[in-house]
Image (tube, coloured by chain):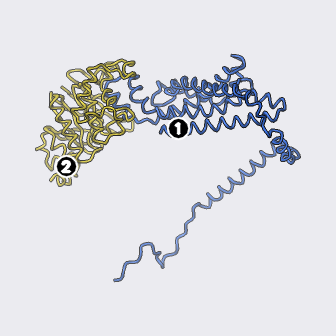
Chain colours: A blue, B yellow
Amino acid sequence: MGAPPHPVTPDPIAAPRVWTRHTPAQTAGRVLLRVASAVAIVWAAQGMGVRWEWVADSPTQLADLFGRMLPPDWAFAGALVEPLFQTVNIATLGTAMAVVLACPVAFLAARNTTLNRVSYLAARLLIVVSRSVDSLVWALIFIIIVGPGSLAGALAVAVRSIGFVSKLFAEGIEEIDRGQVEAVTATGAGRLHVLFYGIVPQIRPVFAGVCVFRWDINIRESTVLGIVGAGGIGFVLNTAILGLEWARVGLILLVILGVVALSEVGSAAIRRRLT
Amino acid sequence: MLEVSALAKRYPTGDEALRGVSLTVGNDEVVFVIGPSGAGKSTLIRCINRLVEPDAGSITLDGLEITTLPPADLRRARRQMGMIFQEFNLVERLTVMENVLSGRLGYVGLWQAWRRRFPPEDVAMAFATLRRVGLDGMENKRADALSGGQRQRVGIARALVQRPKILLVDEPTSSLDPKTSGAVMALITELADEERIPALINIHDVPLARRFARRIIGLSAGQVVFEGPPAALDRAALGVIYGGAGEELEGALA
């Protein structure tokens, strides 16, 4: 007896076995799906009513626009400090209000801490309503209620953020370890004691991470709120565009880019340290 | 002391976890419950403090019927029952001291609890208990920084500062290595003796049960199939409890 055949050597007598990733039916389905996607895209493009002669002109227009924005009007920088400060305030205040309001909503929107079916559905409905309306629309609504300015902006940011913050908090609450909650319950602690000792410590990192993340998003959102009159740097941007002061527009865009980049780097750094 | 009679529990999935279990735990008595996975050991313990609601039967602790207590009275009754868990179930992001003091949560107001202002006698008791379980000086470590054996000692301390009338212990050593298991089990039984607290201890490690038990109850498929001292736990008895696997277990005991 020689050495036994290597186990991976194919049996020379048997017919080679065929393997394909998809069955013919699956392949046909995949081709059909791709054709359908292509048709949908072409159809959508036609529906847009694009004026191709304008598109053909666009590289020249782009160069012209940038030409007018550059060099930026640096002398205008001093006038931007105040609205920029306002923008950051709108984002920060709005986020703070959203977080305070989102806490009860989140506990009601999490399956394991909600009171009953009605409270769960009500909280979920609130989240959907808050998320389905854009902050610019909320800003228009709050300008009618409290008048134009930063307050309307902060309220718009807050209401827009409640849904996002509550949803992520609720997901965090649903993912907690039940054993820790069970142990605190077993000591005879009351419902709220269990909440503060068994649940809150577990969701604290999620909580902090979501706050910082949403603040970062809100900085971006509040830069445009001024366009509809809700305070901040967006108002100055809109004025400059309407006044065709392109060098100022260039500077404002640069400043917005800088602030957004800073907030993004900052929030990423903070969130990294939270895990 | 603790009297359980005709306790039954069927889960919504249709599993009959307990089918008429009756047992008593006398004053100062430590009773071990053995049985294969799925025999209903954990369900039994959880029904006693109603983390799981039993379907039928009665449970009395010092004459107080537990099964019919309304929520507020149930919480008062739970303060009398210290529970120790298989997975320790410490609040991982809290410190050792906070975890131990959570055993006193049933006795402090919400604001005190939130501000971590426990009565000085509770704190003193927590320190003394930590020293007794061998964690002197560890009070400010976070629970997730401890080893398995240390965590279970915190779990034991948490149950003890409740000053319970009974300890409910659910497989306390299943997540530990053999050497640590022996030490933790020795600690639990010593403390139960010293403090004169009766205990009901689930365990599926038969040799460990033999080493520490004076009375053993065998549970199989939701029914009590054995009751007696460790010496009576022979091959035939193991066969009844573990359904034919008795011989292998007997071999493991030699």
| Residue B58 appears in the figure | no
Which chain is mark 2 on? B
Residue A207 location in percent, x, y? 50, 31
Q: Residues within 10 Å of mark 2 (few under 14, many from 20)?
A: some
Residue A123 location in percent, x, y? 55, 26
Question: Can you tell which quarter of the image residue A218 is in?
Answer: top right
Question: Position of B226 compared to A36: left or right?
Answer: left
Among all residues in the image, which is located at the extreme front? A75
Along the line of sight, the residue nearer the viewer: B223 or B204: B204
Residue at disc 1, secondary structure: helix
Question: Position of B10 compared to B215: left or right?
Answer: right
Write down the residue under mark 2. Answer: B239
Q: Residues within 10 Å of mark 1 (few under 14, many from 20)?
A: some
Q: Is residue A122 above or below residue B33?
A: above
Among all residues in the image, which is located at the extreme bottom? A1
Write down the residue under mark 1. Answer: A271
Residue at horizontal 15 percent and vertical 44 percent from the top? B210
Residue at horizontal 49 percent and vertical 39 percent from the top? A273
Residue at horizontal 16 percent and vertical 41 percent from the top? B212
Pointer 1 and pointer 2: residues touching (CB < 8 Å)?
no
Residue A19 location in percent, x, y? 55, 66
Tag on residue B145?
Answer: none
Question: Can you tell which quarter of the image residue B20 is in?
Answer: top left
